[in-house]
Image (tube, coloured by chain):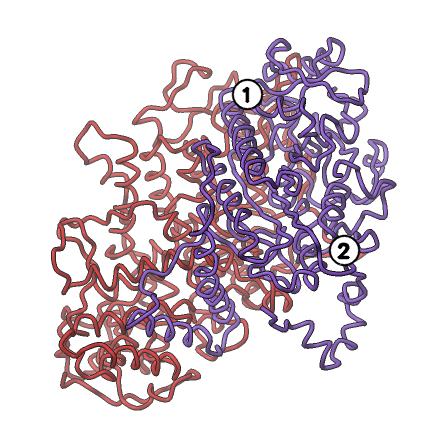
Chain colours: A purple, B red
Amino acid sequence: MAVINRREFLQATGVGAILAASPRAAFTQMVGPPGPFSDYRALVCVFLFGGNDSFNMVVPRSDAEYNVYATARQNLALAQGDLLPITPITSDGAQYGLHPSMSAMQTLFESNRAAFIVNVGPLIEPTTKDQFANESVAVPPQLFSHNDQQNQWQSLRGQEPSKTGWAGRTADLLRLNVANQQLATNISLFGNQLALAADDTVAYAMGPNGPIPFTGFGDAGISLERRLAFERVIGASYDSPYERAFADIQQRAVQTVDRVNSALANAQTLTTVFPDSPLADQLNTVARLISVRAQLQMERQIFFVATGGFDSHDDQIQDQPGLLENVSESINAFYNATVELGISDAVTTFTQSDFGRTLTSNGDGTDHGWGGNQLIVGDAVRGREFYGTYPRLEIDGPDDVRGGRMIPTTSADQYAATLGKWIGVPDADLEHVAPHIGNFVERDLGFLI
Amino acid sequence: MGHRVIRSESTGSLRGTRATAGCLALIALIALAGCGGGGGYSGDPADPPAGPPPPTPPSQAELFQFLNQATFGVTEAEGQSVIDLGFEAWIDRQMQQPASLQLPHLRSLPRPQVVAQLQGDRIDVWFRNVLWGPDQLRQRVAFALSEILVVSQVGALQQAPYSLAGYYDTLAQNAFGNFRDLIEVITLHPAMGVYLSMLGNQRPDPSRNIRPDENYARELMQLFTLGLVDLETNGTEKLDAQGDPISTYSEEVIEGFAHVYTGWTYAGAANFNQARRNDTNQTVPMQLYPSFHDTGPKTLLNGVTLPPGQTGVQDLQDALDNIFAHANVGPFIATRLIERLVTSNPSPEYVARVATMFNDNGDGVRGDLGAVVKAIFLDAEARSTATSTTSGKLKEPLLRLTQLWRVYNARSANGEYRVRSPSAIFGQGPLQSPSVFNFFSPFYAPPGEIRDAGLVAPELEIATEYQNTVLTNFFYSQIFRYNSQSPGLRNSDIVINIDEEVALAADTDALIDRVADKLLAGQISDTLRTETRGIVDQTPTTDAAARAAEAIFFIASSPEFARQH
């Protein structure tokens, strides 16, 4: 896989010097990790599309705080007695509980294997309610819009054009250290994702159950000839960038599928039982891929899996239990699979979502908010903790920017920088992962060992 | 074959050398027929010309380019029609064609029906209409609109196939009408009402912290009409004195519109809060229940505030007028339609010409979609066959399928098109988007040269390694296993007719010419010809069907076929 890429080619030919004046200059000055890794690590991003109402996922349980919550949420408030108690080691004075459909996460949290980042969201710099109102700080553009905030979470580009994702930039930073890998560091099981887009590392998208082979291609006879001829067609030069991009994708598809599937054919059979859901299918596939990491010479992997349906403008009371149960049970099964594989301390699973939702109700649902709570699971997690500051869930309160939208007190940059550092990015390079990390005091939220 | 003709190549940069050397059975013959030459091709007889033919018949490349933009794929008959009429008169005639509809078909099916089956019937009738409906242009524009004004089976409309079919029909019926009317009918359509939760939205109740749902208020402006930032007439972003983009609306404006869209639910309900979907109310406009409408003042766009005390109908009319009057609508909808129909990266001048037509059709009418569509297709940028870096686009997967099916006359014995899980196979299906953001974003730019050049390629968002493999396999199966020479076909199998190719199969170059004529306007690259010839020549001449299938598969799965010129 020692394929020289465009940037290396440019540098080798001296063209890199020209790039020094371009926006890529910063990128070419990266430090990079010191050398090959001696271990394996993987990040698994579980993106909850639509905007998870995570103030109904992690909920204040002590009377005073619960009453503030219940007053704000009215007919969407969960019953106090239904909340599943969780007890963070470091208390902020209040007590908390989980949504009643997340008993598996309650167990993982209480056994120190899970934690929450609370009230986290895209920020450019620390932002207070007054600063937001005065417009005296920069904030990400198009707050409360789905695609823009998905792009913020995935790119962390703030007011810059979002061309690459934080995981893609992380993969680029690691790429010289993982030169033997048989697969791209970044793999999506849920289509193209900005989070994985990079300058040099080309992400690979497979199906929820892994790559699928081409029907008419084989190893001998006419099916081999057909495959070779097909590869020559897609390897030809084309007039139009649309054709070239299409042909590149076809080339990666043809060249990758056999390598991955022959490795998976030798994968050990997992005894862990996964739930029956598309998210669980994706996580099951990730577990199988991790189980064949040695065959594929993988040292660092970032997986993207996802599930949708969280845009609960309507019918939230009916729909949210099933959504959160699926998240809880699927992630729990995946965690158990990593235990079965003996790799649970090297695989960290974490959630992201478009935004939290409004505390106010529109009758039977909620609208687009800003900050929210996110879940992290794995044996590298300093578990049974909240990272960040749980907000006061009060309409027009100190954390409410408008209509019950919580201003994040921890930034998505800090979240990503912590993940990036754990997977091997040197501290000096964290700005490339999280461009605004320099605006925040804590570069590492400390949730990973 | 006996009908080979030499055709002079009028325009276009040919990538292969063969295209000039003879060729061109299908469409080239039509071209001659249109000029009084002999027919004799085995397809349907062409309609007689409606008037004097245009002075210069379009070249094969020009015909393919036009029909791939304006229809679901080239057929001999449609090509002949364009030759006879010319582009503009063809468009005029197409606009007179009434819409091929879905809902009457669904309603005609014997009861009782299982909902999942009805969703399949909806897909079936979509294919029937887009493949063989005489209103090709209308269906193509309706499909484009269905990817802009998105509602979807995925989510709350899973159990509402009639509503989805009726919504699609609404798009088809209004495809050439006025945009102001279109946004009103989609606003009040219960499919949209359910999908973006305006249905059942009610006035605020501050005592319970309940305020109106902002879903439709936001997406009607962001995705359907205006976008997030102010636009110049040419579609580029307006900038303020600091050089920054200007937001089209504030959160306060969204709240204002959210208050406008209160008080509506299914028509005919005895009680607003207990309105439930039934077979009939899911296809008729929502009804206002005045006591659930907010009567306060409402902040709209451009500094307009609606006075308190208006009726819900008046508020709605005023609010839609307010959006419709915004200067963004012309460039916004021009850009979206051009992207769906013609090219991913139109020049600002092209957008400006179409937006100007939106703003005034020449008779002082704003929002005339018929005039807009005509301006899109007749524009020099749409009609140029000269290749530039940015011209054309990647075909979306369903269009690659319908183009293959139309030119190979794909039929099932029972007349149905039962495509199970189109979304799984193609990454898209009729009204099956995963969210209101469509199957792909208009802003998607794949990493690499397209992104680096500041261009977009929306369709590439769903062209992943995985999805391309699934689609390539579907094509392989269709072409090798479900063709007119295949044994053991069932009534429901959708079968392409490869008889012409089989008749030519012993002559490899003639076979390749024929397939390239049907799928690539004859413009096959040297590499694709060489590789196709190689694989055909390795297939025994005794297996004519396999030789034909190899040629069709190689060309249909090629990057060349994936590109719309």
Tell me the element at label 2.
Answer: helix
Residue type at numbered disc 2: His
Q: Nearer the viewer, residue B535 or B195?
A: B535
Q: Quadrant of the C terminus of chain B?
A: bottom left
- Crowd tier of the residue under label 2, counting other residues whose Cα lies within 10 Å: few below 14, some 14–19, many 20 or above: many
Q: Quadrant of residue B17?
A: bottom left
Task: Determine whether, in the image, residue B503 is placed left or right of residue B66.
Answer: left
Residue type at numbered disc 1: Ser
User: Which of the two labelled residues, at mark 1 and mark 2, occupies the earlier sequence position?
Assistant: 1
Q: Is residue B286 visible?
A: yes
Q: In this picture, is A387 found above or below B368?
A: above
Chain for disc number 2: A
Marking on residue A432: 2
Q: Work out how far the residue at label 1 is from the one at label 2, CA to CA, in angstroms.
A: 38 Å
Q: In this picture, is A400 found above or below A287?
A: above
Q: In this picture, is A169 found above or below A367?
A: below
Whole-percent x and y of residue A172? 69, 60
Q: Is residue B315 visible?
A: no
**Residue sitting at 62 percent across and 53 percent down?**
A196
Marking on residue A117: none
Q: In this picture, is A310 found above or below B346?
A: above
Q: Quadrant of residue B442?
A: bottom right
**Residue sitting at 48 percent across and 53 percent down?**
A206
Report the residue marked by disc 1: A101
Tell me the element at label 1.
Answer: loop
- Crowd tier of the residue under label 1, counting other residues whose Cα lies within 10 Å: few below 14, some 14–19, many 20 or above: many
